[in-house]
Image (spheres, rainbow, N blue to C red):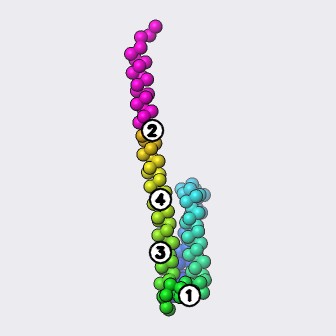
Amino acid sequence: MERLLNVIAITSGILIALVLISVRRAHIRVEYSVSWLLAATALLVLSRSRTVLENAAGYLGISDATPMALLLIIGCVFLVMFFRFSVIVSRLKDDNIALAQKVAVLEYHLHNLQDRADRSPLS
């Protein structure tokens, strides 16, 4: 049990460091890094607080399975994060489609203006 908690704590620390480095190098936007930092911090706190895990295991009805409660909580946290990022990606795809349609309309109008300019006599 203690080994699992130590591995989760180390992994959480590495995740926090990676996110901060990525923000500093502009590989990830700040608004997206907040979710990762919150999740990693929550995992770090959970891995260091055995009483919270035991209470969570009791609340979930898992007797003598504190590691199972921790893994269940980790899974739920990341499931929520993946859903959030799926919503963001979907919104970006919709925005890209709308932008492509606007560019197509502008190109159509530009070609019409060029055709009119080519047909008009130079006086």
| Label 4: which secondary element | helix
How far apart marks 1 and 3 lie (CA) works out to 17 Å
Does residue 108 belong to the magenta stretch?
A: yes
Question: Which callout, 1 or 4, points at the residue further toward the start of the chain?
Answer: 1
Vertical relation: 37 (above or below) 31 = below
Q: As shown in the figure, which amino acid type bears the numbered disc 1?
A: Glu
Q: As shown in the figure, which amino acid type bears the numbered disc 2?
A: Lys
Give the foreground label among 4 and 3.
4
Give the foreground label among 1 and 4.
4
How far apart marks 1 and 4 lie (CA) works out to 33 Å
Instruction: Give the numbered dot on residue 75.
Output: 3
Please name the predominant secondary structure of the magenta segment in the image: helix
Question: Which callout, 2 or 4, points at the residue further toward the start of the chain?
Answer: 4
Instruction: Give the numbered dot on residue 87.
Output: 4
What residue appears at the point 48 percent right and 61 percent down from the top-left corner? 85
Vertical relation: 58 (above or below) 119 = below
CB atoms of marks 2 and 3 within 8 Å? no
Q: Let me know if residue 27 appears in the view.
A: yes
| Label 3: which secondary element | helix
What residue appears at the point 48 percent right and 79 percent down from the top-left corner? 72
Mark 1 residue crowding within 10 angstroms, few (<14) / some (14–19) / many (20+): some
Which of the 4 image quarters holds residue 22? bottom right
Indicate the position of residue 46 as horizontal and vertical percent values.
58, 79
Question: Which callout, 1 or 3, points at the residue further toward the start of the chain?
Answer: 1
Residue topped by disc 1? 54
- Residue at the outermost top position: 123
Q: As shown in the figure, which amino acid type bears the numbered disc 3?
A: Gly
Q: In this picture, which residue range is highlighted in magenta?
A: 103-123
